[in-house]
Image: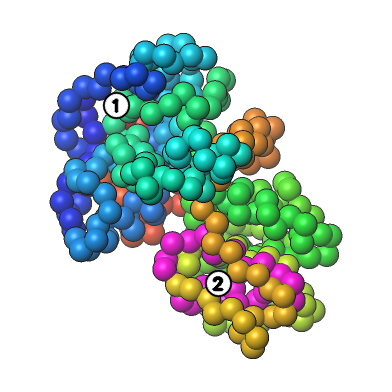
Amino acid sequence: MKALQYREIGSAPEVVTVPDLEPGPGQVLVKVTAAGVCHSDIAVMSWPAEGFPYPLPLTLGHEGVGVVAGLGAGVAGLAEGDAVAVYGPWGCGTCAKCAEGKENYCLRAAELGIMPPGLGAPGSMAEYMLVDSARHLVPIAGMDPVATVPLTDAGLTPYHAIKSALPKLLPGSTAVVIGTGGLGHVAIQLLRAMSAARVVALDVSEDKLALARTVGAHEAFPSDGEAAGRIRELTGGRGAAAVFDFVGIAPTVEIARQAVGVEGDVVLVGIGGAGLPVGFGHTPFDASVKAPYWGSRSELFEVLDLARAGLVSVHTETYSLDEAPLAYERLHEGKVNGRAVILPNG
């Protein structure tokens, strides 16, 4: 079968032929109908050889949907032909966090060498993929694979980030979304669907600001040195109740620090690597800074229910598996408006 792999440090991903897959005990073979392209993959492919955490070659793709094509011994509750989405942040299944469905915060994953598909384990950018357990598959019967696949990360990650801030997003409050690309444009929709807050969107791209307005941002303007001041002016000096930074580089984190209000939340979702000093004189009184990761299994069900209700959708553009390297080039150049989706089986 064909797969898109990152094969050498510093090289571009390439489409190669790899051995066909057979499900072992407890595993499920999925024929992939759609796989999402994410900035996280570009971050992984930019890491230096020293300390690179994953074995190579690595089949990319941590967003995946498909149909069940084979069942390993002992698998129950699934049948061949079932349409499913892959829950990506795999955990041990037995620790206290996994018992809550929060496998994104599994307490033993690192110890046991458990890695997500596409981020250590072979991912979804292939004609077929192996899923380690039936519990990591969520039914999506009747849903469009292209529209659904980004929800497994680009939907689930902002949903998880926003959910914890909802008690602060009351009528009259303001929520700020920094970076309105793949995850950010979904976050705007989630904020509109789940809260009464005014939503302010920031980006350096006018195309992405236009997308932000289209999906529901009340205000959208450049993410520049004047952004925090404009937010303060919009809020009558109060600042934002919550700032969601989907970029995570030094300039955006500084905007978040300046824009957040007393008792507000700064939520650093982007993996740009910048941090934020916390303490007296650095942040407003009782402001909190969080760095969430992905989301729980139950939250994926909730995101899919929002999509079924028509309350959230993802702007997508599609590519064949052979065109997948081009999709990554376009994403790296900032030319993907929304989310790129690969169709491994046409």
Instruction: From the image, tell me which residue sits under label 2.
Output: 222
Please tell me which residue is depicted at 68% across the width and 54% down the height of the picture. Answer: 164
Q: Quadrant of the N terminus?
A: top left
Q: Is residue 316 visible from the viewing direction of this image? A: no
Q: Is residue 9 visible from the viewing direction of this image? A: yes
Left/right of residue 16 with respect to residue 106 in the rendered view = left
* Disc nearer the start of the sequence (1/2): 1
**Which mark, by number, is residue 193?**
none
The type of residue carrying mark 1 is: Glu
Residue 139 found in image quarter? top right
The type of residue carrying mark 2 is: Pro
Label 1 environment density (alpha carbons within 10 Å; few <14, some 14–19, many ≥20): many
Range covered by the magenta-colored residues? 249-273
Q: CA distance from mark 1 to mark 2?
A: 40 Å
- Which is nearer the eye, 184 or 131? 131
| Local SS, label 2 | strand
Give the x, y percent position of residue 328.
Answer: 31, 50
Above or below 343: residue 74? above
Above or below 189: residue 283? below
Please tell me which residue is depicted at 55% across the width and 20% down the height of the picture. Answer: 141
Instruction: From the image, tell me which residue sits under label 1.
Output: 127
